[in-house]
Image (cartoon, grey):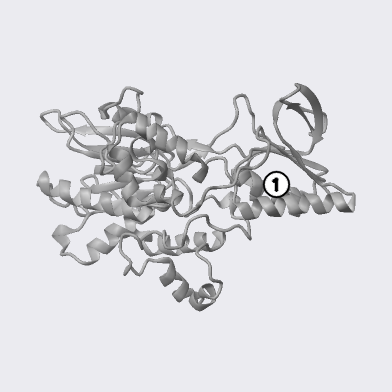
Amino acid sequence: MNSPLTGSDTTDTTYDVLGIGFGPSNLALAIAIEEHNAGVPPERRLNALFLERQPRFGWHRGMLIDDATMQVSFLKDLVTLRDPASDYSFLCFLRERGRLIDFLNQKTLFPLRVEFHEYFEWAAARVRHLVAYDREVTAVDPVRDASGAVTGFDVVCAGSGETYRAGDLSVAVGLEPHLPPGVELSERVWHNSQLLPRVAELRDRRTPVRRAVVLGAGQSAAETVDYLHRSFPEAEVCSVFAKYGYTPADDSPFANRIFDPEAVDVYFGAPSEVKQSLFDYHRSTNYSVVDMDLIEALYATSYQEKVAGRERLRFLNVSRIRDVRTRAGGALDVVVEFLPTGEQRVLEADVLVHATGYRPRDLTTLLGEAAKVCLRDDEDAIRVSRDHRAETAPDVTAGIYLQGGTEHTHGLTSTLLSTTAIRAGEIHRSLLNRRTEHLRPSAGLGA
């Protein structure tokens, strides 16, 4: 095998844990491991490496709108709920940047999204020695011992063909953009995850934008509408959605308890029908909902434009996009149907943005051969234990921990930041406990 960081030959290196993906979830785990290793003798340290396909740390860069704020408290950072004394906290970051008092004077729990991303980058830089960037995983193969038991995994990366061996995996590959069936992306048709770079390209090329259409009714859709409206002051921006109006997010204190760490225990132990009920009851905390402040701001802007007699912000509610055709020269004909009557109208647009959400990545495709050792439930979803480890066949001693894609077992927080620090701590403890149970010595570099 090749060394992930130097490219030299280290064929006998085995990592205790190998992370696939390096977003906030695996970053939080890397910090937990780094803090553990700093306080124990070498023989008790975990030898870890995290593989990330991006060239540097990045988290939803395409939606880092300058004035957009986080929707979770800064106390739900990478470490605080696990260890309030950790010096990897958001408050320690602010202190180092010289902005702690300034932030406190704002009297808010919700930082700017760009600032929280800066915090993530700061934390990622501090554990840089545990990360190999520009490594896209293409295969995960079980490693069997002489008896046929699976004792580890070989993880193969594209391009360089590098292979890394580990006793356990932590899979945290995040979400991927969701698009309606048949949609083909182009220079004029985007997913909102590419909003900022696409707008920058249009500005750099001085491409005229007379009308932009946005499909979607959630927070990202509303933010996209607002950003396009501000970015192109001469353009008409049309928001298309099937609802009558944007639905406010339920961030009331009692509803927010669904994001408490204890709620994961309740959800995990509940019968399947109760899990579904909890999910349905509390969809309004996260899915297809918008912060009330943004709803009111958009409505106020729309009304002001009506008063002024120049309406650039239009809301095509109870509607669907039925077809998109490209004209000569690149402009789009977007066919919008008003659902109550079936009436259709054609909007000539320069840009169409699908703010249609995200979905978990297909773990079966990612894990490949390794997915075959995972047990499945009646819905063909991977069975997952409370410590976030995939349940596997009896002859498997290696572990696959899943950070994300576990809403069916662990609830709404599976893909959110709310319990990231707690989950990292739980996985870290499980890694240590299992190493003790199996009497697996720490691999150590070159071991």
> Position of 176 compared to 343: left or right?
left
Please name whichever residue, 72 or 233, is drawn nearer the observer in this view of the structure: 72
Whether residue 12 is situated above or below residue 323 in the rendered picture:
below
Q: Mark 1 points at which residue?
A: 225
> Position of 13 compared to 307: left or right?
left
Please name whichever residue, 146 or 418, is drawn nearer the observer in this view of the structure: 418
Query: Can see residue 21?
Result: yes
Kindly identify the residue that appears in the image at 56 percent across and 62 percent down.
112
Q: Which amino acid does label 1 sit on?
A: Val
Please name whichever residue, 336 or 174, is drawn nearer the observer in this view of the structure: 336
Kindly identify the residue that appears in the image at 21 percent across and 48 percent down.
430
> Position of 407 compared to 69: left or right?
left
Percent across and percent down for residue 127 are 36, 61
Pointer 1: residues within 10 angstroms few (<14), some, or many (20+)? many
> Position of 105 compared to 406: left or right?
right
Instruction: For the N terminus, give its image quadrant.
Output: top left
Task: For mark 1, give the secondary structure.
Answer: helix
